[in-house]
Amino acid sequence: MPAMPPATATADTSRAGLIGLAPMEGVIDALTRELLTAPGGFDWSVTEFVRITDARLPPRVFQRICPELDRDSQTPGGTPVHLQLLGSQPDKLGENARVAAALGAPVIDMNFGCPAKTVNRHDGGAALLRSPERVYRAVQGVHEALEGTGVPVTAKLRLGFEDKTLALECARAAEDGGAQRLVVHARTRREGYRPPAHWEWVARIREQAGVPVVVNGDIWTLEEYWRAREVSGCQDVMLGRAALADPWLARRIRHWQQTGERLPATRWQDRSAFLAAYAQRIDPALPSKVVVSLLKQWLNIMRQHDSEAGEHFQRLRRITALEDFMMALQQETPLPETSAVIPD
């Protein structure tokens, strides 16, 4: 087991890595990206996927999924936003990548990691990991379509579909196809999100890769951030569910990188205020029961690694009315003046 950084360690800023905010379909939309990147710490974020089938999509589809295209492809706080495509037809992926690039997407990311059964049944996401050749052709189709635009291609992969047999081949195929960075979720599609994440397999990919490799999966704390880097050998990481569980994790990692000092753990008062800010900013056209469901979904992620959030989840889980939920959310959680800043 690699050593963890001591509490008073001096950060090695020469090895300070980048931190990306992962795409999470149906979870991290433009509003969530704005809120999660506002505290600072993230170097880039990625949209939910744009599903590509057999048609050239109109600009409004890309702008709906990535409204940041109208803001120089950045969140309001200035974090770059990369646009992700999901599909399997190289020509159609390339054609739509050109549309996205023309709209201002700074990077096209390709989804080979989505484990959803519906997506996989329709030949998307992790389903392509059963054939390195198809991974290669899909990336190549986008890479060639974007030649001359200056827009690079990246790829997000898992370690395989059923098992890890083709992990190295698929990663090599994505690179050979033109991907300039690989983000590797350290589990197979079959493993879903069950621990542990196999960071040692990411190390095997990194050792053979000629492009930067980013480690993703089970980085919930500063200690796990450190271990993931040490085991994988990757300087850069991507946070997904962990960012939802603790919206200040990226900032805490960045602070340690810069100073060697550990910031205090995130308090429940700050988590509940974050949820309240989300509820206040969400689309008012959404039915209240949908908003409550989204808040419970987020709180359910928070409770997985925080016992206090777990206690509040049990208190709130049976409430169905939005007004009642918001009142209960803020009970016994006065927000002190020293609380973390929540974006307006």
Image (cartoon, rainbow, N blue to C red):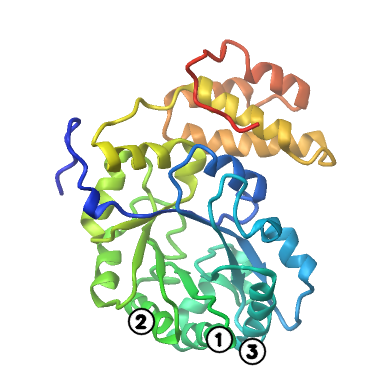
Name the spot of residue 297 as percent of width and height, x first.
Answer: 61, 39
User: Residue placed at 65% from the left, 51% from the top?
Assistant: 29
Name the spot of residue 233 as percent of width and height, x first.
Answer: 23, 61
User: Residue placed at 71% from the left, 59% from the top?
Assistant: 70
**Is 227 situated left or right of 79 in this image?**
left
Which of the marked residues, 2 or 1, is nearer the chain's N terminus?
Answer: 1
Query: Could you classify mark 3 by the number of other residues whose Cα lies within 10 Å: few (under 14), some (14-19), or many (20 or more)?
Result: some
How far is disc 2 from disc 3 in space, using C-alphas? 21 Å
How far is disc 2 from disc 1 in space, using C-alphas? 24 Å
Residue labelled with disc 2? 172
Q: Point out which mark residue 116 bears.
A: none
Q: Nearer the viewer, mark 3 or mark 1?
A: 1
Q: Secondary structure at mark 1?
A: loop
Q: Secondary structure at mark 3?
A: helix
Q: Point out which mark residue 148 bears.
A: 1
**Is 122 situated left or right of 42 in this image?**
right
User: Residue placed at 41% from the left, 65% from the top?
Assistant: 183
Q: What amino acid is found at the position of numbered circle 2 in the picture?
A: Arg
Q: Nearer the viewer, residue 165 or 38?
A: 38
The relative height of residue 57 versus residue 323 in the rendered view (above or below) is below
Q: Nearer the viewer, residue 318 or 19?
A: 19
All told, the count of numbered labels is 3
How far is disc 3 from disc 1 in space, using C-alphas? 17 Å
Q: What amino acid is found at the position of numbered circle 1 in the picture?
A: Gly
Which of the marked residues, 3 or 1, is nearer the chain's N terminus?
Answer: 3
The relative height of residue 331 versus residue 251 in the rendered view (above or below) is above
Residue labelled with disc 3? 91
